[in-house]
Image: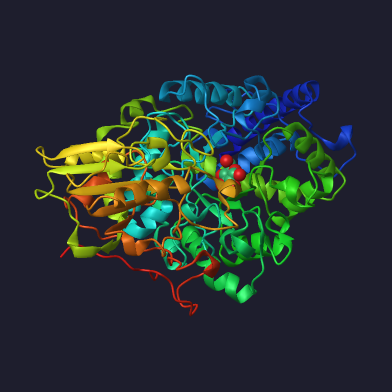
Amino acid sequence: MYCTSGKTARRRVRARYRVLALGMLAALAIGTGGGSARTGGPAESPGIALTAVERAGDGPLPYLDPSLPVEKRVDDLLARMSLDDKLGQMTQPERRYVTPAEITEHRIGSVLSSGGSAPSPNTPESWADMYDGMQRAALAGPLRVPLMYGVDAVHGHNNVVGATIFPHNIGLGAARDPGLVREIGAATAREMAATGVDWNFAPCVCVVRNDRWGRTYESFGEVPGLPSAMTTMIDGLQGEKLGAGPASVLATAKHYLGDGATQGGDDRGDARISEERLREIHLPPFRAAVRRGVGSVMVSYSSWNGVKMHEHRYLITEVLKGELGFTGFVVSDYNGVDQIDGEPGFTRDEVAKAINAGIDVVMVPEQWKKFVRYLRAEVREGDVPMARIDDANRRILTKKFELGLFEKPMADRRQAAVVGGADHRALARRAVAKSQVLLKNSGDVLPLGATEDKILVAGRSADDIGRQSGGWTITWQGEPGDITPGTSILEGIREVADSDTKVEYSRDGSGIDDSFDAAIAVVGEDPYAEYHGDRTGGLGLDETDVRTIERLQAADVPVIVVLVSGRPLDVAQRLPDWDALVASWLPGTEGAGVADVLFGEIAPTGRLPVTWQADADQQPINRGDGKKPLFPFGYGLTYD
Ligand code: GLC
């Protein structure tokens, strides 16, 4: 408690007693669940329904006093919270399934937007309005505890139309530049802050081991050293100190643990590996993230040797929180608790298992009232110790205080101009160029330049912002088309090519003839996210793309293939007929970065973050496993 003089102490005690008595009456009246009188359950700290403006003595309530150490503020606030206050902090509905009034009534501690869940119109201003509305509702609660709002800003603030969309992680892994990744994190934080959003479910620090996995592109690479190095994203997002700097949002290292190790690359599948292998390959990026002070960790849907991660007390509590010393909070994945028993929906038993395993916040988009009811019952029947509830709340509140949410709860609208601004787009363009990997360049056909007077650009992915951005862009799955402002690869080529170079476009390659000096085929995958991108069969090019390239090959001109994909594709059979191959990955809105490399404005320096299979049947194929790939991990050419 706090040291005060005798007289002041007596006055404060009297004041607190009076307020406490009033609070108890108010608490019982509005059913915030206070003492055990109502239920006979284990002793619960009484609910003191204080209005935040009420003051004990002559200063602000200790938890509202920013001059006090965070630990003291947490202690004071916890002591004022009822069980229901605490359960609300552990509950995270999705925005479509909760109203501001319910946020107030149920003391909801955080809300999320699932992929693509956006206000209408989808503008930074309406995001900020939505956020502020929910925040005002949270602050209207008796203890005035601000909420956090979480999104997947996994390659820029990608749910927001007009935001800068950066290359997906696999491209950033190819760039091998942790400082650049930190800058991208900082830019993303600023664009998020402009909309109020203060919690990012990123970075994914997964180690992809089988490229059939639909989340391969969310990985920085197949060896632990790459995701570990790129945890600089956390510094960018959170700032040197959480809550400091021009913008600071809570980062999330995900998905703990071994999501990239599943059999067959099956998303949400089972990682059947030894603990030694799990620790050697998949744990290091989380150790690095914890060392950088990551604020939260998200649990994986996947299992380890048949046990669901969402009920894995050993790995969550003993390893992550104990051995690694993680002091932030652990969040479940979306409806992750439901999947523990493999049956639809969730039970009280699953809720107890998840919370007792060490999960602190449950992402329960729709059935959040049932979750609160179940968890309250589990606590009252002693299946979930009150100490576990208090530990979870301590972790959550500590981050909220550190983020400065109690002092600055509303959207920082001063940042609005940075959303999709020129500086961020220039940064993204630089990242795109650094992520390009030159895999073949026969006869030094690249870089293109003054000798090429007439170029034909072809392919489904040449003039398509949606395809070049991939999943997690405006919508969860992403989609082809002009989905958000940006520069397509074709537009970039037109911008960068010499002014006297004639650039023509033919989506399917028709119209090619010997009058052209070169043909560029920009081809690749349709956008996808998560299990929708799992590929159990071949990993070859789509037939449409094959036909486009073959059309170009009919003429006697060099054919340069630019591959826009979330993973290595099976191109070995066709590669001999191509003059050049560039792995472009999923570059995002700044397609001119691809052209910068094609025309030699920037020499290619990217190197493979994953082994490139000679045949899909080789998967999983990784550095050091003795298999003979088409291109090894780390491969990449540059210009003479
Ligand atoms: C998804 C993903 C996770 C994401 C969460 C919220 O299913 O697994 O990466 O952060 O749900 O959108």
Residue ID at (37%, 54%): 172
Q: Please state the quadrant of the image where ligand 1 appears.
A: top right
Q: Which colour scheme is used?
A: rainbow
* 518 sits to left or right of 299: left
* 383 horizontally vs 252: left or right: right
Q: Which of 58 and 234 is in front in this view?
A: 234
Which residue occupies the extreme bottom position in the image?
626
The C terminus, quarter of image: bottom left
Residue placed farthest to the right in the image?
40
| Near-viewer residue (213 or 176) | 213
The answer to whether 308 appears left or right of 600 in the picture is right
Numbered circles on residues, count: 0
Confirm whether residue 243 shows in the render.
no
In the image, residue 321 sits, relative to residue 370, either above or below, namely below
- In-front residue for pair 248/204: 204
**x, y percentage for residue 273?**
64, 71
Choose top left, top right, bottom left or bottom right for residue 292.
Answer: bottom left
| Apparent side of residue 200 relative to residue 142 in the rendered image (left or right) | left
- Residue 174: give x, y in percent of width and height: 35, 59
Q: Where is residue 630 in the image (x, y as percent from the top left)?
A: 40, 69
Which of the image's four quarters has the N terminus?
top right
Q: Is residue 549 depicted above or below 152 in this figure?
A: below
Residue 173 in the image: state x and y as whole percent.
38, 58
Nearer to me, 404 or 195: 195
Residue 119 visible from this viewpoint: yes
